[in-house]
């Protein structure tokens, strides 16, 4: 059985977003946002589920022919929600999976090839977690703390993630950093081996995560290997009503 056929794709989706309540159900090009994400994921795997804590999202997914699973309202993160959903789906289907993919529910412009590239990372037996990175194209963007940077080894495994520019270009004016060295933006899509997904949900926050407010630093701090797959596709996340307005203005 190929890795793709043995992969479960989960899309965590909360209704009560602080910055944009009801975000998964906002309409984009005649469909709720969560449907756009679901349809992209369904190109890759026959096993796609939305993991939600709200019956409105659950009903919306079922209404367009998708599959959803109800999860707790108490989860700290999408990773925790994914693990609960993974356990429930495995129980219902009476089977397990080799790879679990966490696709953000507010990324309607992802492409299936990004998910496929994550899954392919697990052809290497030592890989425990995989995520995406995209080269920065604008120098100013590397100084934006909302655009997370990642540096990685020659074997494409993560060394560190930061809201600050990494690496630091000593002796170079700020406006010349990107011309001096490549910088990579972290794209927040993850894949895990199931036993690793279970393990990382039980680890307490560490100093690095508390400092940067980046969950993946907890995993690095505890010695987990995170593979980095490079993508050239610019996916547009919808985090706020303003993001949605900007998108509609462009179209």
Image: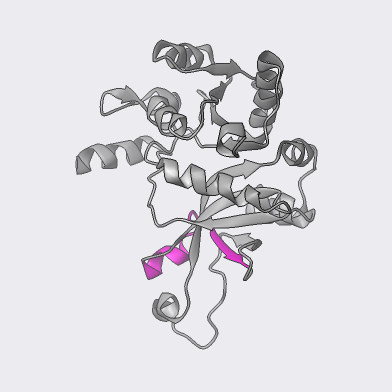
Task: Say above or below: 219 vs 15.
Answer: below
Q: How is the image coloured?
A: one colour
The magenta span reads: 138-152
Q: Quadrant of the N terminus?
A: top right
Seen in the image, is 126 located left or right of residue 235?
Answer: right
Q: Residue at x 46, y 12 (%)?
A: 62
> Which x, y percent locates residue 22?
44, 23
Quarter of image, res 32: top left
- List x then y, in percent, for residue 69: 59, 17
Residue placed furthest toward the front: 1
Q: Is residue 7 shown to the viewer in this render?
A: no
Residue at the image position 67 percent from the left and 31 percent from the top:
97
Residue 207 lies in the magenta-colored region: no
Horizontal and vertical percent for residue 107? 43, 38
Quadrant for residue 208, please give it. Answer: bottom right
- Residue with the most extreme bottom position: 171
Q: Is residue 184 left or right of residue 99?
A: left
Relative to 39, residue 227 above or below: below
Q: Is residue 210 above or below residue 35?
A: below
The spot of residue 176 in percent (x, y) is: 40, 80
Residue 90 visible from this viewpoint: yes
For the point 75% across and 53% down, which residue is it? 224
Q: Quadrant of the C terminus?
A: top left
Vertical relation: 189 (above or below) 8: below
Q: How many marks?
A: 0
Q: Write the residue at 76% across / 56% down.
A: 221
């Amino acid at each position: 059985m190929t890795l793709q056929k043995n992969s479960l794709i989960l899309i965590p989706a909360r209704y009560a977003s602080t910055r944009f309540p009801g975000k998964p159900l906002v309409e984009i090009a005649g469909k709720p946002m969560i449907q756009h994400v679901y349809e992209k994921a369904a190109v890759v795997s026959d096993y796609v589920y939305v993991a939600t804590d709200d019956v409105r999202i659950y009903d919306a997914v079922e209404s367009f022919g998708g599959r959803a699973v109800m999860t707790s309202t108490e989860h700290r993160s999408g990773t925790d929600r994914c693990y609960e959903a993974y356990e429930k789906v495995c129980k219902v289907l009476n089977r397990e999976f080799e790879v679990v993919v966490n696709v953000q529910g507010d990324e309607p412009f992802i492409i299936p090839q990004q998910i496929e590239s994550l899954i392919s990372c697990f052809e290497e037996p030592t890989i425990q977690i995989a995520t995406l990175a995209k080269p920065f194209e604008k120098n100013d963007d590397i100084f934006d703390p909302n655009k997370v940077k990642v540096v990685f080894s020659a074997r494409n495994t993560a060394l560190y993630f930061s809201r600050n520019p990494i690496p630091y270009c000593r002796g170079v004016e700020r406006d010349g950093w990107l011309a001096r060295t490549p910088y990579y933006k972290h794209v927040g899509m993850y894949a895990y081996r199931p036993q690793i997904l279970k393990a990382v949900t039980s680890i307490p926050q560490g100093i690095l995560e508390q400092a940067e407010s980046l969950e993946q630093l907890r995993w690095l701090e505890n010695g987990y290997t995170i593979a980095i797959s490079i993508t050239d596709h610019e996916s547009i996340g919808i985090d706020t009503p303003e993001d949605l307005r900007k998108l509609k203005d462009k179209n």
